[in-house]
């Protein structure tokens, strides 16, 4: 008979940046900004408390994304608890292209497995990742949120399995994220993309994505060239003109800058000494954070 662990389980999940320029829907990077969550099995009912980002906006019932993800993971383990208590301390900004929804999904599935006695034997890491990817609908953010580091992910043809392959990141590479005050939804950003692109643009983008993997692995001097995108960023300019203008200005100065995920956050790669200068490029009203690459992914704390 499946039983639950006594006392609360705590999990920490990193922010992520997907696409990274040319790696549309396939490349993702975990960053050192983390949400912290705690859950406990109770005798009945559901209690959800949220502080930080999303406080006062997200639902506090069964429709909460963390709760829905927990329910899915409990279902995969073949059990549902009589009651739940969930506390979320959110640092990752919502609807800014830093993977807040993926962090919530990954936190939920990891919490649920952690609350089930012997949960890792019932549901292994790969199965838990694939569940998270199905909930999100695509793996490019959930993969680095779950595994940490730099991850190449996708889905086999014909609604096949999701896959995720970790790749190395040069220890010199860090990041500065410049976060505007106004959100942009992923749905709006995706709605601006054309159904087709010219073959020449697709070929050029494939070359830059391959170069980006090599640049991140050990040739950071190639990051500017490797982050050049031909598939999505310019099409999204109407939804985030200030972000794309900042990307243009930074790249004109030789800085490998991109739109993070679906935007509107701007991510600029740098080494540690160069980060201070990038923080100073923060537009009025924006937030700025100097982050390192998170190597751990989701973890029970």
Image (cartoon, grey):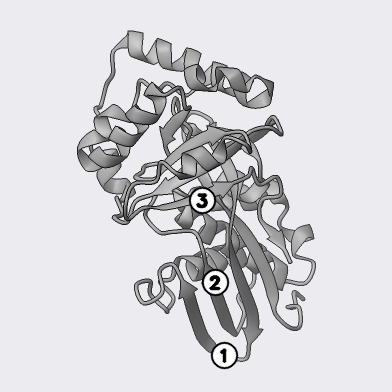
Query: Which corner quadrant of the image does residue 204 belong to?
Result: top left
Q: What crowding class fits label 1: few (fewer than 14 Cα within 10 Å), some (14-19), or many (20 or more)? A: few
Q: Residue 186, image x and y in percent?
A: 33, 47
- Name the residue beneath numbered marker 2: 89
Furthest residue in direction top, as rendered: 200
**CA gap, disc 1 and disc 3:** 41 Å
Q: Name the disc covering residue 289, or none.
A: 3
Q: Is 97 on the left-hand or right-hand side of 39?
A: left
Q: Name the disc covering residue 44, or none.
A: 1
Between tags 1 and 3, which lies in front? 3
> Are discs 2 and 3 less than 8 Å apart at CB?
no
Between 105 and 232, the residue placed more toward the observer is 232
| Sequence-first disc among 2 and 3 | 2
Q: What crowding class fits label 2: few (fewer than 14 Cα within 10 Å), some (14-19), or many (20 or more)? A: some
Residue at the spot 61% in from the left edge and 58% down from the top edge: 13
When the figure is inspected, residue 93 is found, relative to residue 235, above or below; the finding is below
Q: Is residue 97 visible?
A: no
When the figure is inspected, residue 34 is found, relative to residue 225, above or below; the finding is below
Callout 3 secondary element: strand
């Amino acid at each position: 008979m499946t039983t639950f662990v006594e006392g609360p389980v705590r999990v920490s999940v990193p922010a992520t940046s997907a696409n990274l320029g040319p790696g549309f829907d396939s490349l993702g990077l975990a960053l050192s900004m983390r949400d912290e969550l705690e859950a406990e099995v109770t005798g009945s009912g559901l209690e959800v408390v949220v502080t930080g980002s999303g406080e006062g906006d997200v639902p506090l019932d069964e429709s909460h994304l963390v709760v829905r993800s927990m329910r899915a993971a409990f279902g995969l383990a073949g059990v549902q608890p009589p009651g739940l208590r969930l506390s979320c301390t959110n640092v990752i900004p919502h609807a800014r292209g830093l993977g807040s929804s993926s962090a919530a999904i990954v936190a939920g599935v990891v919490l649920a497995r952690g609350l089930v006695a012997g949960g890792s034997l019932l549901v292994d890491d790969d199965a838990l990742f694939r569940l998270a990817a199905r909930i999100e609908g695509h793996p490019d953010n959930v993969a680095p949120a779950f595994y940490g580091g730099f991850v190449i992910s996708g889905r086999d043809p014909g609604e096949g399995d999701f896959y995720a392959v970790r790749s190395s990141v040069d220890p010199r590479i860090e990041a500065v994220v410049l976060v505007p005050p106004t959100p942009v939804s992923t749905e709006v950003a995706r709605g601006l993309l054309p159904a087709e692109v010219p073959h020449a643009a697709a070929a050029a983008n494939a070359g830059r994505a391959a170069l980006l993997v090599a640049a991140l692995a050990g040739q950071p001097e190639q990051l500017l060239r490797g982050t050049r995108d031909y598939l999505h960023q310019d099409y999204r300019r109407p939804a985030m003109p200030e972000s794309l203008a900042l990307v243009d200005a930074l790249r004109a100065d030789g800085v490998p800058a991109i739109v993070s995920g679906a935007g509107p956050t701007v991510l600029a790669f740098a080494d540690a000494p160069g980060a201070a200068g990038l923080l100073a490029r923060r537009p009025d009203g924006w937030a700025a954070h100097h982050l390192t690459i998170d190597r751990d992914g989701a973890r029970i704390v």
